[in-house]
Amino acid sequence: MESALRYADEYPHDPDPLTCEARSRNQTSKCPSSLNPHAIRQGSITHSLNNDMPDKVVSDRANVSTEVIEHHYDRRSEREKMEQRREYLNNL
């Protein structure tokens, strides 16, 4: 199996993995468990920001400007950002 079964003990979607359309190498994107690299990148950047990694460090690590991070990758709400700043300032 080239899709979800490739990394798991059980096949979570099709009752018969041998008939799954996402079984072949060039069809794996059709698997419901498949994630595109952009989604993984976005999740990684947001996770780093949520865990108090400084914007500049995230920017350098992901090789993307802080402006692009703020515009396209940062999924934190304004309230989450505010609370994160407050916690940081309280620790000074």
Image (cartoon, rainbow, N blue to C red):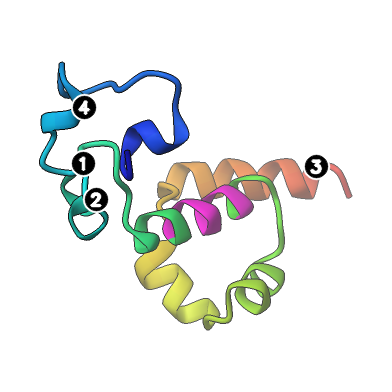
* Residue 14 pos. (x, y %): 15, 23
Q: Residue at x 36, y 55 (%)?
A: 39
Label 2: element kind: helix
Task: Give the CA separation, mark 1 to mark 4.
Answer: 11 Å
Q: Which residues are magenta?
A: 42-48
* Residue bearing mark 4: 17
* Residue bearing mark 1: 31
Which mark is in front, 3 or 1?
1
Which mark is in front, 1 or 4?
4
Q: Can residue 66 be spotted in the picture?
A: yes
Amino acid identity at mark 1: Cys
Amino acid identity at mark 4: Pro
Task: Give the CA separation, mark 4 to mark 2.
Answer: 12 Å
* Residue bearing mark 3: 90
Q: Can residue 74 be spotted in the picture?
A: no
* Residue 92 pos. (x, y %): 89, 50
Do labels 3 and 1 touch, CB within 8 Å? no
Q: Is residue 58 left or right of residue 65?
A: right
Q: Does 55 sit above or below residue 7?
A: below
View extreme (right): residue: 92
Do labels 4 and 2 touch, CB within 8 Å? no
